[in-house]
Image (tube, rainbow, N blue to C red):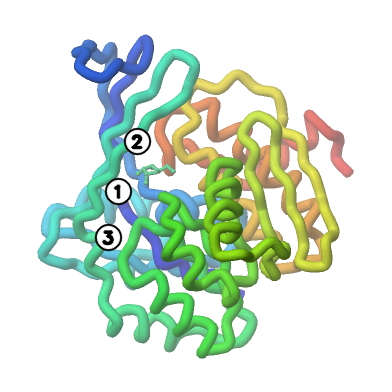
Amino acid sequence: MTILNFGSINVDLVYALARMPQPGETLSAHSFQKFLGGKGVNQSVAIAASGGHVRHVGAVGPDGDWALARIAALGVATDHIARVEQATGHAIIFVDEQAENMIVIQGGANQALSLEQIDAALATAVPGDWVLLQNETNLTIEIVQKAKAAGLKVAYSPAPFDAEKALAVLDLVDLLAVNQYEAGELRAARRALGHTAPVDATLLVTLGSEGAELVSGDGRNLRQAAFKVTPVDTTGAGDTFLGAFLAHYTQNPDRAKTALRYAAAAAALQVQSHGAAVAIPAKQKVEAFLAERVGAG
Ligand code: RIB
């Protein structure tokens, strides 16, 4: 079973600050680092690190060698990543002393996926495979429609949130992954259209330091608390949670509780290191953490 992840690839330019700047204010960063990131690639790395099989479908620009080398080094194949004319996507990220972040993205090559590339990637899928996507690439609606036409299951993380895009595919999605803010925005957008019934898709809501909740279409509800740790950088924690969860859940949806616990442990470890993709822990590390925190069973 493979997860085809149509996802963004960013160069994260990360500035560590004592606190976030106010509008009109100039602040000095006390450090600067360049990391691999992008919601899409972070999720692919988390799937691979968690023992899942992922095929990343994306695009980089003529300047993409640095990102491609890092993606490969983190265990994700790069053969479905196109080279396009636009520069590789990047993100400007501020991280403060509370480990919170502010992110601005510039899509670049992430906005240059082509229908041919999508078709070629989908042609490699077999029954039982899943498609994963976020909102940091172009053609999101087409990806979902084509994936469903091919009989595949779809997991969708509508971030950055765009109500129009999310509503256009909501009825086709099998698993919808949102944070609290996105869940509220989606509820408001549906209410404005007169939709008050729950969504059919299984809903994974990440709640930051409060953990996560999984609500199935039949109304069954699982709650997972977050493990208490001291974070240094929360960038990519939600991506880590989703990728780690999907690596397990897509293999066996009946073991959703185990998948949630594993994902919470992976995210707890990820926030204790700097950077997004590079901070995602390997399966052995997550299992050792779980054995220590909740026992071997
Ligand atoms: O979710 C974190 C990611 O959002 C960062 O890695 C950044 O690239 C943006 O896509």
Q: Classify the position of the C terminus by image quarter.
A: top right
Q: Does the Cβ of the disc 3 residue fall within 8 Å of ligand 1?
A: no
Q: Earlier in the sequence, mark 3 or mark 1?
A: 1
| Percent of width and height locating residue 123 | 43, 88
| Secondary element at tag 2 | strand
Q: Quadrant of the N terminus?
A: bottom right
Dot 2 beta carbon under 8 Å from ligand 1 = yes
Residue hosting label 3:
110
> Which residue lies at the image location 55% right of the left edge and 41% below the top edge?
181
Q: Amino acid at mark 1?
A: Asn
Say if 167 sits above or below 64 in the image: below
Ligand 1 under 8 Å from disc 1 Cβ? yes
Residue sitting farthest toward the right: 297
Amino acid identity at mark 3: Asn
- Residue 174 horizontal/vertical position (percent): 64, 71
Q: Are marks 3 and 1 in contact (CB under 8 Å)?
A: yes
**Residue drawn at the location 68% of the way across and 65% of the way down:** 199
Q: Residues within 10 Å of mark 2 (few under 14, many from 20)?
A: few
Q: Residue at label 2?
A: 103
Ligand 1 in which quarter: top left
Secondary structure type for disc 1: strand
Name the residue rendered at 81%, 60% in the picture. Answer: 255
Q: Nearer the viewer, residue 40 or 183?
A: 183
Q: Specify which label sits upstream in the sequence, 2 or 3.
A: 2
Relative depth, front residue between 184 and 206: 184
Marks 2 and 3: which is nearer the front? 2
Q: Which residue is mark 1?
A: 10
What's the CA distance linking mark 3 and mark 1?
Answer: 8 Å
